[in-house]
Image (cartoon, rainbow, N blue to C red):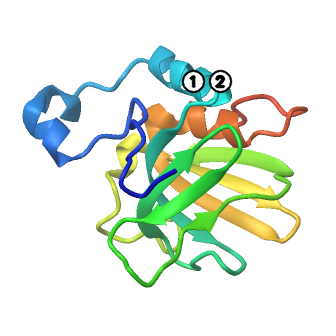
Amino acid sequence: MSPKQRPPRAAGSYGMASVLRHPSLVFKRPPRAASEADLTAVRAGEVRRVACWLAGSYPPFPPRFRQGWLDLSKDDAQWRPLLSLRRPVQHLTGPIESVRTHPANVRDPGLPKGAPDRAICVVVSCQTPSGSIDLVVPESDGPLVVGYFSPADQPASPTE
């Protein structure tokens, strides 16, 4: 994917310009069917971009949550920092053993005060053989991220 070509955003991920054009986005969440359509599109070979805060328990992932974009494609998941020239793109590859979700709350270690409103976000924790990767994503995009990372033998949306 070319850096100049931005993939379409997932249903629950929108920027300031989108909110200025459609203020109702602040109050109205997209339907669950929109996230399921995004997952179908990714599995069909398209790319979707999700607003995401990332932290990991092992290198090369940052130990504290960092803001960025999660680009999901059929073959690869990449996390790109929002505003940084020094942090490289992180490829989220390797075997995912389990996926768990829970609502984001103030007790999540390392979640900065400037993080997205905790009432509209979920934490998706992916357990790998090396450790865990935590992704804070909009609640509307939770099913897309969980469905993407869930192992084939695990249900699509486990909750702690």
State how far apart marks 1 and 2 are (Cα): 5 Å
Disc 1 secondary structure class:
helix
Numbered tag placed on residue 41 in the rendering: 1
Residue under the point 72% across and 54% down: 126
User: What residue did someone put label 2 on?
Assistant: 44
Residue 75: image location, x then y, percent: 71, 43
Q: Where 146 falls versus 104 (above or below)?
A: above
Disc 1 + disc 2, Cβ < 8 Å: yes
Amino acid type, residue under disc 2 in the picture: Ala
Q: Would you say 122 lies left or right of 30 here?
A: right
Q: Residues within 10 Å of mark 2 (few under 14, many from 20)?
A: few
Q: Would you say 144 lies left or right of 139 here?
A: right
Residue 95: image location, x then y, percent: 86, 54
* Residue 75 seen from this side: yes
* Residue 105 seen from this side: no
Residue under the point 76% across and 39% down: 150
Amino acid type, residue under disc 1 in the picture: Ala
Within the image, what quadrant is residue 152 found in? Answer: top right
Between 68 and 125, the one lying in front of the other is: 68
Residue 108: image location, x then y, percent: 52, 65
Between 111 and 12, the one lying in front of the other is: 12
